[in-house]
Image (cartoon, grey):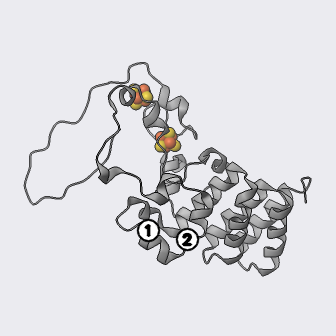
Amino acid sequence: MILLVEVLLELDLPADEPFAADRCGACRRCLEACPTRCILPDRTLDASRCISYLTIEGRGAIPGALRESVGDWLFGCDVCQSVCPWNARFGRPTADPAFAARPILAAPKPADWLSLSQEEFSARLRGSPLKRARRAGLARNAAVVAGNLRRPADVPALGHALREDPSPLVRAHAAWALGRIGDAPARRWLRQALPLELEAGVRSEIHAALADGAEGPG
Ligand code: SF4
Ligand code: SF4
């Protein structure tokens, strides 16, 4: 796997040559495995559709047309790296404890992230790159994951996020996820939140979620 890093020095170092060798040949595995098909045949990347961009760097809503493709990726996406034969051949798990997952990251559940306060988020992720997505960004991602997993067990956490989260971004994605689950409790949370919600963007997500499940249960 490739880990991108940057080291800032005061030294005037000579630049090395650009990497020009073609090590891909006829392989197209990463193009075909990419969930959003954002790796283009000319070997450029449409970053606006990359799940790593959308779930880490993107500060706004994840476009509706791409949410299903996010699947259960909470933070970033490694599909293109995982399928690359170079990684399969040479990549080895590290025993360095500095790279070991923290307990909250070992088996993350969407509900864990939806209910984190800003204080808990800062304390648990101190020093972690996951902080880059910020609390609202990770809660937004957790809502999308919950909407894709469609587990009724996530409905209470999504409902509380829709009713109480201070971020309209989180509330909007929680509404979408409740619409995807679409069972009677999910629709009850949506109906109860509608008269209390003042943000137009969140209201429109609630309306869309209720309309999507109009023929479903509840
Ligand atoms: S990180 Fe995921 S979404 Fe982004 S280019 Fe790779 S496979 Fe595609
Ligand atoms: S999977 Fe690896 S070797 Fe294959 S095209 Fe992508 S980067 Fe190249």
| Quadrant location of the N terminus in the rendered image | top left
Q: Is mark 1 within 8 Å of ligand 1?
A: no
Mark 2 or mark 1, which is nearer the start of the sequence?
A: 2
Q: Is residue 66 above or below residue 102?
A: above
Q: Quadrant of residue 82?
A: top left
For the residues bearing labels 1 and 2, Cβ distance under 8 angstroms: yes
Image point 92% across, 53% down: which residue?
Answer: 215
User: Can the viewer see residue 191?
Assistant: yes
Label 2 neighbourhood size at 10 Å, few (<14), some (14-19), many (20+)? some
As helix, strand or loop, the secondary structure at mark 1 comes to helix
Most foreground residue, 210 or 105: 105
User: Can the viewer see residue 57?
Assistant: no
Image point 20% across, 55% down: which residue?
Answer: 7
Image point 38% across, 61% down: which residue?
Answer: 128
As helix, strand or loop, the secondary structure at mark 2 comes to loop
Q: Is residue 159 above or below residue 10?
A: below
Q: Which residue is mark 1?
A: 124
Q: Where's residue 48, x and y in %?
A: 52, 50
Most foreground residue, 44 or 199: 199
Q: Where's residue 121, x and y in %?
A: 48, 71
Residue 173 falls left or right of residue 124: right
Q: Which residue is mark 2?
A: 116
Label 1 neighbourhood size at 10 Å, few (<14), some (14-19), many (20+)? some
Indicate the amino acid at tag 1. Arg
Q: Where's residue 139, x and y in %?
A: 58, 64
